[in-house]
Every structure is written in C-alpha cells, then in structure tokens.
Amino acid sequence: MIFTRSRATAAVASGAVLLALAGCASANVDESSASGGSSDVSGGTLITYNSPESFANFGALLEQFSAENSVEAPSDTKNSGQALAALVAEASAPQADAVYLGIAFGPSAVTADVTEAYKPEGFEDIPDGLKDPDGKWFAVHTGAIAFICNTEAIGDLDCPTSWADLLDPKYAGMVGYLDPSQAAVGYSVAAAVNLALGGTIDDFGPGLDYLTKLKANGAVTPAQTATAKVVQGEIPILIDADFNGYAAQYNDDAPLTVTIPEEGSIQVPYIAGLVKNAPHPELGKKWLDYLLSDEGQATLAGGYVRPISGEVPDDVADKVADADDFERAEVVDYAALAAAQADFVTAYQAQVR
C-alpha cells in the first residue's frame, strides 16, 4: 500500500473539551501492543465509538467487517466530542474497543490516556503529521473545507470559486458556515480562510477581518450541521467539508457543486485508535487493520472521503476534486490549532459574532 502526502487540517474539538482534558496525565507507551497483525477473531461484538452509518460509508464498512469476521458490529451515533467524553468517563471500565475522531481530538485522547499503541500494516507509510508516533491514533481518511453551492438557489449567478468572491455584494445573504465558537467544522472554516489569506495559527487577524466582512455581507452561522439547509436552498452557499457536499450531490441527487477555494483551504482528516484496556482488544485491532486495508480504504472512499492511502477508486475519482485541486489544502500542527481555539473563540465573539 503506497501512501501519498496529504496537506491539511481537521475538524477541531470544542475549547471546553480541550481545556478540560489539558490537565489529564499521559501514559507510557506499551510497546508490546504497538505492532500490527492482530490475531484471528470470530464471534462477539465490536464496539466502535462514533461510527454513524450515513457518514464516510460507515454502514458499508460495518456490514463488511461483520460478515467477514462473523461478529456483530453495530453503528454508534456519537460525534467526536461525545465519543471522547464517553471514553474519559468510562476510563476505569471501558465499553468500546476502538474509536473514530476528528484529528484534533487525537492529541486530546493521548493526553487523556484513553487510547493505546497499535500500528496496523501500512501505519509506517502514513505521513508523520497524520499519526501519533507511538500508534495511539492515525488518520484513515481526509477531506477539505470547500464551497458547497446550490446551483438552483443562486439563480443566474455563477457559483463562487474564491474566498474573495464570497464578499461580492451579489452573494449578499447567500453564504453560511457553522458557528466556529460552537462547531468543529466552523472552526476549520475559520482556520482555512485565515491561512489562505496569510494568517498563522498564532495570528488569526486575517481570518477574523475576513469573517467580519463576510458577516457584513449577510453570512449566517448556524450552530449545527447545515447540509440539509444547502440542499433545500435555505443557505445557497455553504462553507463546509467537501465530502458532505458530495454525499448530498450524489446520494440525494441535489443540485450542488463543490469547489475548493482558489486561494487555498485546509483538509479535515479523521483518525482511529485502539481504546485503552478495551473489552475486546483483538477485535479492536482487527477493525483497525481493516480500516487501513485496501478493501477498507476503498469502502471509505465510497463515502466521498479521500482515503489516507491516496488511492481513490475510479468510480469515485470522477466525482470528487482531482489531485491538483486537492493540493490547495494544507496540513497544519493539529495540536497547536486546537490549543489556539480558546483564544480564537474569545476574539471571534468580540469582533465578529
């Protein structure tokens, strides 16, 4: 399996969750659990937190894994923050075998000492910025912050292709993104435009100035997932993860286009890890092996996310951004981005909201 270098960032945890975990102790690495190649398993039930059937093709992933290993593998509807909070609450008696999270939750999971080292085959080929060096988490797929445009709702206008376009008065009242003080994807949007316009993780000034102008042009910032709003035309242009747009475009036959902005963007990788002291550790390892296998990566791609292997199947490749467009997304220091969130939220609420 050959992995290509991806360049970008993740949906990030809420500041409250990150700050709450900041004081937790980190455990020593258990080298005995860090090598790939889990034992054969059959029977039993795999519990993996944050595996909703409708996201990233998890329904098909769980069905395949269940059939191939003769086990039960139910879906779980927790989001990243809820999954991490559950792992922390259950640390003395873990209920889950594996967990799936937005990448910024990976360092927090290590700090909270709720995942343990395991390196499936292919781990060494994942770029360093997309995995914990000890194997306590690793990226399984990625995506990019993009413009999801309802071609019917915007009437005779062309869909925007750049951050600059969104400030044009002709798009007044048409643009939306999730509230970055409440939603992980919203914070990723803020980070994306900030970096695209010359800001850094230590300097959100360009991004805050831009979002102030965007608000003046009528942008709305709902607190919760807004994909349905762009499908219905309530928000004609939504800034969100590209795979949410592709899923609605192809699965729901919605009149949408998805564009990675010309000035640049960031990726939104997702990671997986073995729960520390999992009730069924060999089953958890088998699941992680599967996620990085050729079959698992291809199945993830069926959810319009970009496999961490870089291998996009032909039947998906012609539906998503090509490699050149995707190169406009960047990779950042996810732990640093998460650490900067609290200060960003304070500044955002004072200047933009």
Image: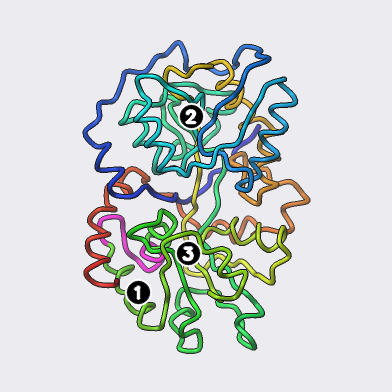
Quadrant holding the C terminus: bottom left
- Residue 326's spot in the image, x, y percent? 57, 57
Give how far apart the Cα atoms at labels 1 and 3 are: 14 Å
Return the residue at label 2: 273
The segment highlighted magenta reads 192-203
Residue 341 shown in magenta: no
Q: Secondary structure at mark 1?
A: helix
Residue name at image x 30 percent, y 31 percent: 111
Where residue 121 is drawn, which disc sits there?
A: none
Work out whether mark 1 precedes mark 3 in sequence or the reverse, and give the earlier one: 1
The residue under label 3 is which amino acid type?
Gly
Measure the C-alpha gap from mark 2 to mark 3.
30 Å
Front-most of residues 90 and 35: 90
In terms of secondary structure, where does tag 2 sit?
A: strand
Q: Amino acid at mark 1?
A: Tyr
User: Can you give x and y, in whole percent of width and height, for residue 58 in the image?
Assistant: 63, 40
